[in-house]
Image (cartoon, coloured by chain):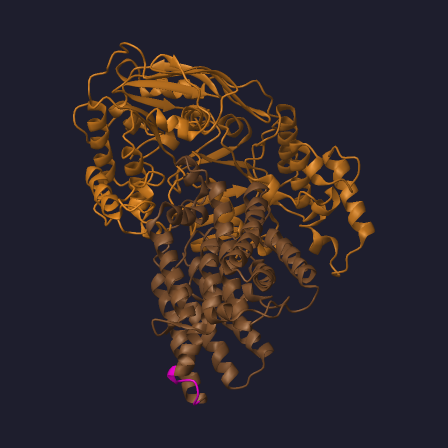
């Protein structure tokens, strides 16, 4: 944990912090953006000056990406002002933003796999040849070569992008943004996929750009980068601006406290028991094709164990591998003492149930009825003689509807018409019908309103009280802290630590999940 | 967690042998099995007979590269051929007739493009609908009868020679060159690849891709209009079922040629080889007096083999 405050990346001496002189190059004032059920941005103001690196910090879902999307024109703000060099401008789409010299390097690549590197770098900006209608291909490859040299990427510009590795694709993406002669460059965790050498090269390029007066907005989860590169820091939480700072006036701990903040008022019903039961899930040295490596974890009956870390750290991948939805390459999964092999069908028979992150696409068949959805996983248990009986299915569904207090007019209602909380209860009910004893919850409260959240947690608490075991993934650290008996923290597709009930705090989770090697 | 850009190794090397092996293998097979196959007259025949299919397969390649499909091509070709025949018989004007055929093609292309790009209807469903519409219209305008009395100057377009080379081969070569330039040397071609590969990239690059997508389907319609001219000249008539089902051969040729149905991975030369493979197959089976129904089954088997290769390649980690 002390690495947090220690080393900076190997870099040239950091530039002196630049005072906020004159007019900002770009200023956002009072930006609000609402999505159905979520206030993604709430009165956020943000400004960048020429030649500065502005660090944007925040937990998952704090609103960083939404803010960047407003900045680059991909989202339209519901309210607020957008000023360029002090004048109000209207940004209706990415093309408008590009005209102002705003270039964005997204985490999801905007590359076309079967075009080559040069075509990708200059997509939409091809050079016309002397023959009308044609592209000047010689110039295309010459200019692409120059861009690649600038970022120190030693590949042929005629290479098709799909043959490149992730790091090289990321560098091409960076080259693409740089080639746009950007005045404002937005980078969303650009170093996530880069090696040390590439990272250093990128930082060197950033310094050159800074010297030319380019403003850089940089989203990072790495504290070392924040302090090594940043001239100014803005912290977001829950869609709100919670603080601004300069690197020489703050500390990593102070920033983490700002990111985490106080807890949102909410009740988490949970009766902790002192003695968990037998081992329900034991994972040893698990690696899978989806990228996770050497995962060791145990979950006992009567326990809720959290699995946390940043988005992309591999939490869902662990769930999918354990459940058998993604192929395992090494290691072992034991469920209630017995080794489990095979896909989701084998997991269902081994009494494992997965409540997936995307309820609407993976958890439910939305156009089918509540009754159908409740019966689907339990068919082998409900109908051991392999003959479907509508009456028995309906009675089983009605039992579950009553037991889980699912608000639905009848078991014949389309599940897509229910509220998020009731839909989630149907997913849980589906596993109860299947006799599940080990529940894996992936973001159990996503898209569910606050009242229903407590109800879901009450239900989970009831499950473990009755002897079930629960592995719970959540991006909301508060949930993990209040509900879990203990938690594993993931980073870079591995488990990097375990926190006991006493050690569980949002600060510890964030620290462990973010700290740099 | 979003699935980031693919990093599968280059599979093209696998695709090249696939279609060439099929072409060479089939040619050898027929050379042995049928003495008439390996004569210069017959080989020239294969080329001439492949041209109409090539004219459909070229734009079909671009359409499939956008992760689309055009099932209406055969029916639109048929309708355009009837309109062309009717106009040329009544006015004796090739220019007017060709204009009519192109018009039919462009209108259907526009409708296809509008349904797909504008209304977001899946290409399979949209073009299945226009297939039905074109087929029905073909029966209406022809009253179920052939249109005969095609003038000799139209017939010569298919049976004549220019510079000592059969005219259709020149037409086919010309359009192949045109599509090569279009796909590999213009913005349009680059964007076609991006339409299938990553539409968000186009949006972020400020390219109005919906209009482009419409243009791709209109190109397909226009090429069906051009093919209608050759078809009318070839069968010396306008016939209400002349090219029904021809989109099947075109899609087969594109698939055989290694163009993938995903991610904008297309290959124009492969399409040419695929067209020749289908041409050789049909010609050879004809020489061996294999009924046409069995020929269709053979093409089907080849296509399944090709798609199997495609799926094996795309599922490779």
B54 with respect to A114 (left or right): right
Q: Quick one: quadrant of the N terminus of chain A?
A: top left
Q: Quick one: quadrant of the C terminus of chain A?
A: top left
The image shows residue A2 at horizontal and vertical percentages of: 29, 27
Residue that lies at the very extreme toward the front in this rendered image: B91
A367 with respect to A511 (left or right): right
Q: Is residue B270 above or below residue A91?
A: below
Q: Is residue A428 visible?
A: yes
Residue that lies at the very extreme toward the right in this rendered image: A391
Q: Is residue A337 visible?
A: no
The image shows residue A450 at horizontal and vertical percentages of: 61, 24
Question: Was residue B36 drawn as part of the magenta stretch in this picture?
Answer: yes
Q: Foreground: A367 or A184?
A: A184
A384 with respect to A32 (left or right): right
The image shows residue A494 at horizontal and vertical percentages of: 39, 42
Rendered colour, chain B: brown
Dominant SS of magenta comes to: loop
Question: Was residue A374 drawn as part of the magenta stretch in this picture?
Answer: no
Determine the residue positioned at 59% across, 31% down.
Answer: A447
The image shows residue B275 at horizontal and vertical percentages of: 44, 68
Q: Foreground: A276 or B49?
A: B49
Determine the residue positioned at 58% across, 32% down.
Answer: A445
Q: Is residue A55 above or below residue B196?
A: above
Residue interval drawn in magenta: B35-40
Rendered colour, chain A: orange
Residue that lies at the very extreme toward the left in this rendered image: A12
Q: Is residue B166 above or below residue B216?
A: below
Specify the quadrant of the image occupied by residue B8: bottom left
Determine the residue positioned at 67% across, 48% down.
Answer: A435
């Amino acid at each position: 944990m002390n690495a947090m405050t220690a080393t900076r990346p190997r870099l040239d001496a950091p530039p002196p912090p630049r005072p906020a002189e004159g007019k900002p190059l770009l200023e956002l004032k009072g930006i609000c953006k609402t999505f159905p059920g979520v206030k993604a941005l709430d009165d956020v103001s943000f400004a960048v000056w020429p030649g500065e690196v502005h660090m944007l910090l925040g937990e998952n879902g704090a609103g960083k990406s939404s803010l960047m999307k407003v900045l680059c024109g991909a989202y339209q703000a519901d309210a607020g002002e957008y000023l360029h060099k002090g004048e109000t401008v209207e940004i209706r789409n990415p093309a408008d933003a590009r005209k102002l010299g705003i270039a964005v390097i997204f985490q999801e690549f905007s590359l076309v796999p079967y075009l080559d590197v040069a075509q990708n770098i200059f997509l939409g900006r091809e050079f016309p040849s002397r023959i009308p209608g044609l592209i000047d291909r010689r110039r295309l490859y010459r200019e692409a070569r120059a861009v690649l040299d600038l970022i120190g990427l030693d590949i042929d510009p005629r290479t098709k992008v799909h043959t490149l590795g992730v790091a090289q694709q990321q560098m091409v993406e960076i080259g693409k943004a740089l080639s746009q002669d950007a005045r404002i460059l937005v980078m969303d965790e650009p170093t996530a996929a880069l090696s040390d050498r590439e990272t250093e090269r990128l930082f060197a390029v950033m310094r050159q750009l800074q010297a030319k007066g380019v403003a850089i907005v940089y989203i990072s989860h790495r504290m070392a980068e924040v302090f090594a590169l940043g001239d100014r820091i803005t912290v977001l939480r829950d869609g709100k601006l919670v603080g601004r700072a300069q690197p020489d006036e703050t500390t990593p701990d102070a920033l983490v406290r700002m990111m985490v903040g106080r807890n949102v008022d909410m009740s988490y019903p949970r009766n902790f028991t002192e003695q968990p039961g037998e081992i329900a899930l034991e994972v040893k040295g698990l690696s899978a094709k989806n990228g996770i490596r050497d995962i060791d974890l145990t979950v006992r009956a009567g326990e809720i164990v959290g699995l946390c870390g940043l988005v992309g750290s591999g939490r869902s991948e662990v769930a999918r591998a354990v459940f058998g939805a993604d192929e395992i390459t090494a290691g072992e999964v034991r469920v209630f003492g017995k080794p489990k092999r095979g896909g989701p069908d084998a997991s269902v028979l081994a009494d494992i149930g997965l409540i997936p992150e995307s309820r609407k696409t993976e958890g439910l068949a939305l156009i089918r009825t509540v009754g159908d959805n409740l019966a689907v996983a339990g068919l082998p248990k409900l109908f051991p003689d392999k003959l479907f009986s509508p009456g028995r299915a309906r009675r089983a569904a009605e039992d579950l509807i009553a037991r889980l207090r699912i608000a639905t007019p009848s078991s014949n209602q389309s599940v897509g018409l229910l509220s998020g909380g009731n839909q989630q209860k149907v997913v849980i009910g589906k596993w109860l019908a299947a006799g599940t004893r080990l529940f894996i919850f992936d973001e159990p409260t996503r898209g569910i309103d606050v009242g229903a959240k407590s109800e879901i947690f009450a239900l989970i608490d009831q499950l473990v009280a009755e002897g079930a075991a629960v592995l719970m993934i959540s991006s909301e650290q508060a949930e993990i802290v209040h509900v879990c008996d203990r938690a594993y923290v993931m980073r870079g597709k591995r488990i990097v630590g375990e926190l006991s009930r006493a050690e569980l705090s949002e600060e510890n989770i964030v620290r462990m999940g973010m700290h740099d090697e | 967690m979003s699935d980031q850009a693919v990093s599968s190794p280059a599979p093209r090397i696998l695709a090249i042998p696939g279609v060439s092996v099929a072409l060479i293998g089939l040619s050898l097979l027929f050379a042995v099995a049928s003495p008439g196959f390996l004569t210069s007259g017959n080989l020239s025949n294969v080329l001439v007979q492949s041209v109409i299919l090539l004219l459909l397969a070229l734009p079909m390649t671009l359409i499939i590269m956008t992760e689309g499909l055009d099932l209406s091509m055969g029916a639109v070709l048929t309708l355009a051929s009837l309109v062309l025949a009717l106009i040329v018989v009544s006015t004796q004007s090739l220019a007017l007739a060709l204009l009519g055929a192109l018009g039919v093609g462009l209108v259907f292309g526009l409708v296809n493009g509008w349904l797909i790009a504008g209304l977001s209807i899946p290409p399979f469903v949209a073009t299945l609908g226009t297939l039905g519409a074109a087929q029905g219209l073909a029966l209406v305008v022809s009253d179920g009868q052939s249109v005969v009395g095609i003038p000799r100057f139209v017939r010569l377009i298919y049976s004549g020679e220019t510079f000592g080379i059969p005219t259709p081969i020149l037409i086919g070569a010309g359009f192949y060159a045109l599509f090569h330039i279009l796909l590999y040397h213009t913005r349009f071609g680059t964007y076609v690849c991006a339409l299938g590969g990553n539409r968000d990239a186009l949006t972020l690059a400020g390219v109005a891709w919906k209009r482009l997508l419409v243009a791709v389907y209109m190109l397909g319609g226009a090429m069906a209009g051009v093919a209608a001219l050759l078809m009318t000249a070839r069968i010396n008539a306008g016939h209400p079922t002349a090219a029904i089902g021809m989109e099947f051969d075109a899609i087969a040729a594109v698939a055989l040629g290694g163009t993938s149905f995903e991610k904008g991975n297309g290959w124009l030369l492969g399409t040419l080889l695929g067209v020749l493979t289908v041409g050789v197959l049909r010609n050879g089976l004809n020489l061996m007096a294999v009924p046409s129904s069995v020929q269709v089954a053979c093409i089907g088997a080849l296509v399944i083999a090709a798609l199997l290769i495609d799926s094996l390649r795309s599922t490779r980690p």
